[in-house]
Image (spheres, rainbow, N blue to C red):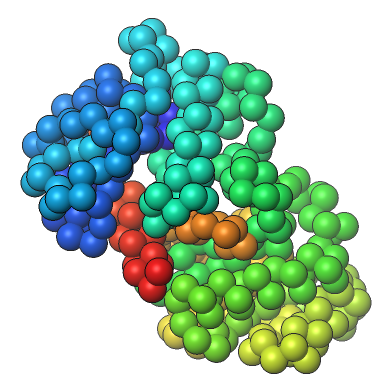
Amino acid sequence: MGDPSGIGPEIIAAALADPAVTALCRPLVLGDRAAIERGIAVAGARLSVVSAPELIPATEPAPKTLYLRELSTLQPDQMVYGRPGPAGGDACYRYICAAAQLCMDGTVAAMATAPINKESLNSAGHRFPGHTELLAELTGGHEVVMMLAGDRLRVTLVTIHEALADVPKLVTFDRVLSTIRITNDSLSRWFCKAPRLAVLALNPHCGEGGMFGDEESRIIAPAVAAARAEGIDAVGPLSADTLFHFAAHGGYDAVVCMYHDQGLIPLKLLHFDDGVNVTLGLPIIRTSVDHGTAYDLAGTGKASPASMKAALIMAAQMARPR
């Protein structure tokens, strides 16, 4: 359900009221009844909440029904819109842990997450930068890659939430090669066979022959060469200021980016409402919205459910081969 003080409950309600979502999957919400019922009211969704302490019934789910596994009983002062706190952070932690376990034991096919607040997660004593790192630990300490995806563009990141000043020393041969490998393997498994990958430079104009930096010749190009030697269809390093035009027009199946904003600015320019965050490298399927808790919109009914719908639909599509 995500942060009860944010837009998570209301965008979940709006998404599950859409027949396009429920035609593809049987959703089970892990969360809080009071928060979900408030979200249904805010979204104006015609849904009835049914407790599902075990599994959703094997029979066809009832129409306009939201199946809920109640993992918290938050009080009104613990879920005030726009005011995150430790109670909400701890509840979020329990939702994530339970969802991961259901995926790991095969009870459910995939998980899709609403946004959380990292400050409230940490204030509850759970020291993780976000979903991705927590899920890696819960599922066995796997090496993971963040992918943001839409119909026109997919991007993966070598470094994620890092200060820009720290990025150059974090862009190493091993990290670039690992990101290329995980991107290739995950796309081959879930999205398309023999994906075409573009690998970006770190510096403007690919370093301009060393004038603007040598990471391209020293780190990125050797990593691309190593990936190609393994049979991966990767090219690079390529200049970020021109590459996205070709990627958005179908030239590549994904773009491997060196740092957060290099990939997310063009992705959100094209897919601000319907982008999906996918964690690659896990033994489970995990998708998420590509936005935050939007405290300024929480409770207003103005938050778009488009990314939540897209995350649920993508999770269902990824799970279908299973």
**Residue 175 percent across, percent down from the top left:** 79, 65
| Residue 95 location, quadrant | top left
Q: Is residue 210 left or right of residue 109?
A: right
- The tally of labels here is 0
Q: Residue at x 65, y 21 (%)?
A: 125
Residue drawn at (83%, 57%) of the image: 170
Identify whether 180 is placed above or below 109. below
Q: Quadrant of residue 301?
A: top left
Q: Quadrant of the C terminus?
A: bottom left
Residue 77 to residue 125: above or below: above
Q: Report the side of 15 relative to 217 (left or right).
A: left
Residue drawn at x 53%, y 22% as measured from the top left? 90
In this orientation, which residue lies closer to the viewer: 93 or 242?
93
Between 111 and 160, the residue placed more toward the observer is 111
138 to 4, vertically: above or below: below
Quick check: can you spot residue 281? yes
Instruction: Pinpoint residue 287: horizontal percent, then vertical percent.
Output: 45, 54
x and y, in percent, of residue 173 in the image: 85, 71
Asked if residue 252 can be seen in this view, the reply is: no
Q: Compared with residue 110, is residue 236 higher up or lower down, i.e. above or below?
A: below
Point out residue 231 in the picture as x, y percentages from the top left corner: 69, 91
**What residue lies at 36% left-to-right and 16% top-to-bottom?**
73
Q: Nearer the viewer, residue 85 or 188?
A: 188
Looking at the image, residue 34 sits to the left or right of residue 175; the answer is left
